[in-house]
Image (cartoon, grey):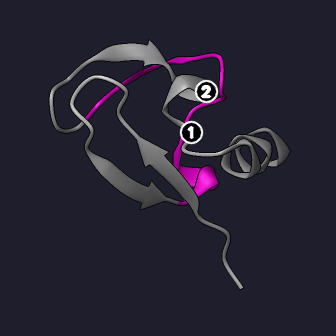
Amino acid sequence: METYVRLLCPECGKSWQDSPKELPSPARTFHCPGCHASRPLSEFARTEHDLQNLKQF
């Protein structure tokens, strides 16, 4: 079973999910695919559970 992380852009509200293996580390700058806002990836995690999944993988 593959784990997915639910992401939500704090600027434009776009939501999506992705495999944590496909994403950078939570502290790295990430760019929203909708509005291209730049923030640490951890700020895009929808819930604390999603943030923990990011940190685990």
Q: In this rendered view, identify the residue nearer to me: 20 or 16.
A: 16
- Please give the residue where the numbered disc 1 appears in the rendered image: 45
Q: Name the residue rendered at 79%, 38% in the picture.
A: 55
SS at circle 2: helix
What kind of residue is marked 1? Ala
Check disc 1: other Cα within 10 Å, few if <14, some if 14-19, many if 20+: many
- Where residue 10 sits in the image (x, y, percent)? 37, 26
Residue 24 located left or right of residue 35: right
Q: CB of mark 1 within 8 Å of CB of mark 2? A: yes
Q: Residue 46: which quarter of the image?
A: top right
Q: CA distance from mark 1 to mark 2?
A: 5 Å
Q: Name the residue rendered at 43%, 14% in the picture.
A: 39
Residue 19 located left or right of residue 15: right
Which quadrant holds the N terminus?
A: bottom right
SS at circle 1: loop
Dot label at residue 36: none
- Please give the residue where the numbered disc 2 appears in the rendered image: 42
Q: Name the residue rendered at 15%, 27% in the picture.
A: 35
Residue located farthest toward the bottom when viewing the structure as drawn: 1
Residue 12 lies within the magenta run: no
Q: Where 1 sits versus 44, above or below?
A: below
- Where residue 45 sits in the image (x, y, percent)? 56, 39
Residue 57 located left or right of residue 17: right
- Where residue 11 sits in the image (x, y, percent)? 27, 22
- Where residue 52 sits in the image (x, y, percent)? 80, 44
* Highlighted range, magenta: 19-32
Q: Where 16 sits versus 7, above or below?
A: below
